[in-house]
Amino acid sequence: MQPVTFILIWVIVWWMVWFAVLSFGLRQGERDAESGAPDNPQLVRKALMVTAGSFVFTVVFVWLLGVFGPQLRAILEG
């Protein structure tokens, strides 16, 4: 697999997981009254967790694609 393909898969996975994780750990009472934004969203911590998790997921996905890719292609082609 080309490095650019790996990076593109990782970026797509990163963004999907990022939007899913943004709301984790927030409580109703921890919002600014004027803007409605959380007082302490812990974005750096969440970004590090998302980066590590999406990298591991992408490595496993690419590995599985390499192992089972030819079999999937044969099944799809009939």
Image (cartoon, rainbow, N blue to C red):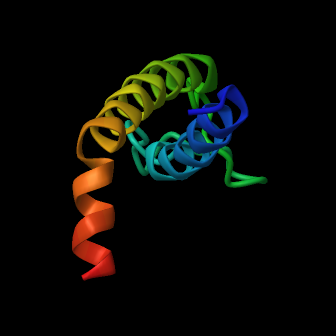
Q: Position of residue 11 (x, y in %)?
A: 65, 40
Is 5 situated left or right of 78 in this image? right
> Does residue 7 lie above or below 51 as drawn?
below
Q: Nearer the viewer, residue 77 or 62?
A: 77
Q: Position of residue 1 (x, y in %)?
A: 56, 33
Q: Nearer the viewer, residue 33 or 44?
A: 44
Q: Nearer the viewer, residue 64 or 72?
A: 72
* Residue located 26% across and 67% down the image: 74
| Quadrant hosting residue 57 | top left
* Residue located 57% across and 36% down the image: 10
> Does residue 62 lie above or below 59 as drawn?
below
> Does residue 16 lie above or below 64 as drawn?
below
> Does residue 15 lie above or below 43 as drawn?
below
| Quadrant hosting residue 4 | top right
Q: Nearer the viewer, residue 74 or 36?
A: 74
Q: Residue furthest bottom?
A: 78
Q: Residue furthest right?
A: 34
Give the total number of marks visible in the rendering: 0
Quadrant for the C terminus in the image: bottom left
* Residue located 54% across and 17% down the image: 48
